[in-house]
Amino acid sequence: MNEAVLRPMVPEDYGAFAAFYRDLHQIHAEAMPDIFRPEAGLPPENVFCRDLEKEDRCMFLAEVDGEPAGMCVLLWKDLPDDPLYPLLPRKSGHIDDLYVSPKFRRRGIATLLYREAERLGKERGVSHLTLMVWSFNEEAIGLYQKLGFCPTMINMEKKLGTTPE
């Protein structure tokens, strides 16, 4: 395999973004059919293009030999410096999506995407990178732990056995 190349997404990447988004949703829908719809609702292309221009995010793509191999969507967040707000002020980056196509997994591309998110975060002066991962996704949890992430909040749920009418 040749080296993966990272670059910012451009409007012409909508097809790759949509395919990755569908794949990512399918993983979740298969693991948790009681929570996720069977089909992903994709952001329309015009919304994707507007998102590319927003200052509060960075969307980039990994390519191998010109073929899309993975993506990362990184959101920038500023917690306010407000005495009425319970958390201390800070700038952070949130990895909203980090996805690698199955064809390219176990080749270091997720780590490469993460390292770019980390580099961009440092460049912006953020103090923390955050992400959320579903508990069924042990492979992703292992990767994130290897990259230095640790749990800071645990979201818990109890199923009551009722279904929506």
Image (cartoon, rainbow, N blue to C red):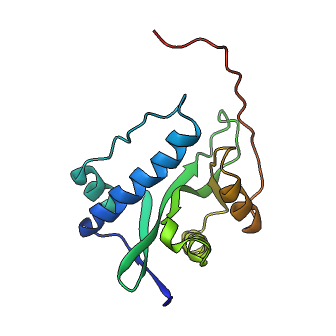
The answer to whether residue 54 of the structure is visible from this angle is no
Q: In this view, does 140 lie above or below 147?
A: above
Quadrant of the rendered structure where residue 91 is?
bottom right
List x then y, in percent, for residue 133: 63, 49
Q: Is residue 34 above or below residue 112?
A: above
User: Which of 33/144 is in front?
Assistant: 33
Residue plotted at (28% across, 62% down): 15
List x then y, in percent, for residue 105: 56, 71
Residue plotted at (30% across, 55% down): 48
Q: Is residue 91 above or below residue 134?
A: below
Q: In this view, does 137 lie above or below 40?
A: below
Residue plotted at (54% across, 13% down): 163
The answer to whether residue 97 of the structure is visible from this angle is yes
Quadrant of the rendered structure where residue 60 is?
bottom left
Name the quadrant of the C terminus.
top left
Residue plotted at (66% across, 32% down): 84
List x then y, in percent, for residue 128: 67, 60
- Answer with left or right where residue 89 lies relative to residue 27: right
List x then y, in percent, for residue 4: 48, 83
User: Which of 66/31 is in front?
Assistant: 31
